[in-house]
């Protein structure tokens, strides 16, 4: 079950990454919507990276 959960979370993160790049290219438009979507996507990507240890070096146990 956890393998399926990991795949779903990775798929959601991939979609967020693609959406972040797409709406990031639309930031020069006159609408606030691409900026808001980019902020939400950036928050998800940052929290996902922090939760999985990509933003800091984890200490090795037993050393």
Image (cartoon, rainbow, N blue to C red):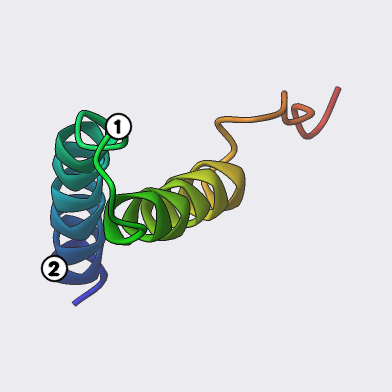
The x, y position of residue 60, in whole percent, is 75, 27
Query: SS of the residue at dot 1?
Result: loop
Q: Nearer the viewer, residue 41 or 57?
A: 41
**CA–CA distance in space, label 1 to label 2:** 38 Å
Residue 39 left/right relative to 14: right
Mark closest to the chain's N terminus, 1 or 2: 2
Q: Is residue 3 above or below residue 53?
A: below
Q: Nearer the viewer, residue 8 or 38?
A: 38
Q: What residue do we see at 39% from left, 50% from top?
A: 35
Residue 22 left/right relative to 51: left
Residue 15 left/right relative to 35: left
Q: Nearer the viewer, residue 49 or 4?
A: 49
Q: What residue do we see at 27% from left, 41% from top?
A: 20
For the N terminus, the quadrant is: bottom left
Q: Is residue 7 above or below residue 46?
A: below
What is the number of callouts on the image? 2
Mark 1 nearby-residue class (10 Å; few <14, some 14–19, many ≥20): few
Q: Residue furthest right?
A: 63
Dividing the picture into quarters, in which one does residue 33 lie? Answer: bottom left
Dividing the picture into quarters, in which one does residue 36 lie? Answer: bottom left
Q: Is residue 5 above or below residue 9?
A: below
Q: Is residue 13 above or below residue 1?
A: above
Mark 2 nearby-residue class (10 Å; few <14, some 14–19, many ≥20): few
Q: Which residue is mark 1?
A: 28
The x, y position of residue 21, in whole percent, is 22, 32
The x, y position of residue 6, in whole percent, is 25, 60
Q: Which residue is mark 2?
A: 4
């Amino acid at each position: 079950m956890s393998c399926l959960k990991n795949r779903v979370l990775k798929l959601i993160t991939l979609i967020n990454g693609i959406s972040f790049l797409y709406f990031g290219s639309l930031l020069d438009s006159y609408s606030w919507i691409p900026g808001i979507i980019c902020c939400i996507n950036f928050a998800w990507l940052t929290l996902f990276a922090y939760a999985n240890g990509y933003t800091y070096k984890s200490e090795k146990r037993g050393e």
